[in-house]
Amino acid sequence: MSFDLPAVRGEIMRGETLAPFTWFRVGGPADVLFLPADEADLADFLRALPDDVPILPIGVGSNLIVRDGGVAGVVIRLMGRAFAGVDALPHARVRAGAGALDSMVARTAAKAGIAGLEFYAGVPGTIGGALMMNAGCYGAETKDVLVSARAMDRGGAVRTLTNAEFGFTYRKNALPPGLIFLDALFQGTPSTPDAVAAKMAEITEKREAAQPIREKTGGSTFKNPPGDSAWKLVDAAGMRGARRGGAQVSEKHANFLINTGQASAADIEGLGEEVRAAVKAQSGVELEWEIKRIGRPG
């Protein structure tokens, strides 16, 4: 689509391929990719952008398939100190920008002797994504530690949202669409750096032993159905190691898809749909995608 763009202090790129911005390393171009300089730059841009132009914020693309045909409208990526800072605060609290890596939040908390945020060491992605999908692992979730978050609406206005307003459930929130998260405030508990670091090391060791984190992957592919595990259902359907083009179901963890080198987004998404069909046929369970899929088919 063609549209006029307002002047910005950040960076604007037209037709920029999004593959390098995702962990799968696949995907077509965004009509426009915008890297705002700071909150004021983002607000000015949103106020001046035509209302009919879609916008989509992304983080580091750890839980994302960008389809081969690319993405319409404006993709907004928050990065740099203005959006990715992490600070330990008094009373065992941590404030983190939406563009901050989850793992950096865990490390900052550990250094300050703040317990309760260790699970973020095992969550790929950024805080913005964690807020969007109530990210968590090993028995802890974002809803357990979030105090509040700030978000900007399409008109450039900023509002503060309490934990309760998110309406968190398993891997999602109940907020209206169109909000761009800016930062979040978390509550931990006082501890010692050594104790927190030890728990983080345990989580990291478990993750490295069980998940294909060295591969081009996108994290957990499907949500766990109530009372069951997605990987067990995929295994039972005989899909561990299954391939489609350059995509493969991980041999190490059956709820992970990987790009073996030359996969297209269509290969990865298509393989995921084959897995869903096989599980449905074998167990009657309809797996839900946890990975977000965006854009136009190639």
Image (spheres, grey):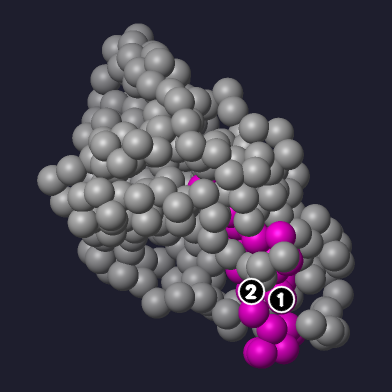
Q: Quadrant of residue 88?
A: top left
Residue 199 in the image, given as x and y percentages of width and height: 31, 17
Q: Is residue 149 left or right of residue 246?
A: left
Q: Quadrant of residue 171?
A: bottom left
Residue 3 falls within the magenta-colored stretch:
no
**Residue bearing mark 2:** 55
Which residue is painted at 41% across and 49% down in the image?
A: 275
Is the residue 97 above or below the residue 110 in the image? below
Which amino acid type is shown beneath numbered disc 1?
Answer: Gly
Residue 69 falls within the magenta-colored stretch:
yes
- Mark 1: which secondary structure? strand
Q: Quadrant of residue 237?
A: top left
Look at the image and tell me in which quarter the C terminus lies.
Answer: bottom right
Pointer 2: residues within 10 angstroms few (<14), some, or many (20+)?
many
Between 205 and 274, the one lying in front of the other is 274
Which residue is painted at 79% across and 69% down in the image?
A: 32
Pointer 1: residues within 10 angstroms few (<14), some, or many (20+)?
some
Residue 149 in the image, given as x and y percentages of width and height: 41, 58
Is the residue 260 above or below the residue 298 in the image? above
Between 175 and 10, the one lying in front of the other is 175
Do we see residue 176 in this rendering? yes
**Residue bearing mark 1:** 73
Residue 267 in the image, given as x and y percentages of width and height: 62, 50
Which amino acid type is shown beneath numbered disc 2?
Answer: Ile
Do we see residue 60 in this rendering? no
Residue range corresponding to the magenta coloring: 48-76
Label 1, label 2: how far apart the Cα atoms are:
6 Å
Is the residue 51 above or below the residue 286 in the image? below
- Mark 2: which secondary structure? strand
Between 275 and 63, the one lying in front of the other is 275
Residue 260 in the image, given as x and y percentages of width and height: 64, 32
**Residue placed furthest toward the left:** 227
